[in-house]
Image (cartoon, helix red, strand yellow):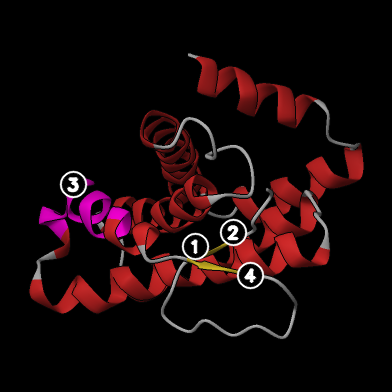
Amino acid sequence: MRTFKVIFNTIKSMSLKKILRLLSAVLPHPLFSVLSFYATAKAFSIAQKLYPETASKNGEGNAFRHALWCCLIMMYCCKISSPEKALKFCKKITDLHEELFPNEPLETKMDLHNNKIGMDYFMEILPGIHRQFFEKNFFVDELKKKTANAKVLKNLDDDFKGFLVYLDEK
């Protein structure tokens, strides 16, 4: 319930221009939009349980949450459409999130990087599993391992290809 309250309050705080921008992205894809909303709530909830101290900050939990978010969007959307369409929508909606809710440049780089890690991981395991049989557990354990090996992003020039990244807020 808390997750939906956070999402509702976030949308409520948006300007009309941002709401219209969001609607222009989600209305053409109503099923994908509902599924991505559900994925958002699920990813937030799981990350809060596993990483209560850092899921809502810029730490390891945030890295995990962004990667899981993309995996879940891809998983749910692939159940009703092709992986290519799911990937295109996932990238569009997660990039839009960063645009509508801007952060500091290093935070944006971190979020976009971790989103890509999630999308790449999904596409990497896709050939081995029929898309109808994906479950969230396929991602959680592996992303927890990736989180344990995450790198600290210190500047915009850092390139940690294949690794989740987070900001050291100590």
Compare marks 4 and 2 and give the one earlier in the sequence. 2
What residue would you read off at disc 3? 137
Q: CA distance from mark 2 to mark 1?
A: 6 Å
What SS does tag 3 mark? helix
Sort mark 3 into few (<14), some (14-19) or many (20+) by Cα contacts within 10 Å.
few
For the residues labelled 3 and 2, say whether their Cβ atoms are less than 8 Å apart: no
What number is the disc on residue 153? Answer: 4
What residue would you read off at disc 2? 94
What residue would you read off at disc 1? 90
Most common secondary structure along the magenta stretch: helix
Q: CA distance from mark 1 to mark 3?
A: 19 Å
For the residues labelled 2 and 1, say whether their Cβ atoms are less than 8 Å apart: yes
- In magenta, the rendered stretch is 132-144
Which residue is at 84% across, 46% downward? Answer: 18
The spot of residue 66 in percent (x, y) is 50, 54
Sort mark 1 into few (<14), some (14-19) or many (20+) by Cα contacts within 10 Å.
many
Q: CA distance from mark 1 to mark 4?
A: 24 Å
Residue 134 is covered by the magenta coloring: yes
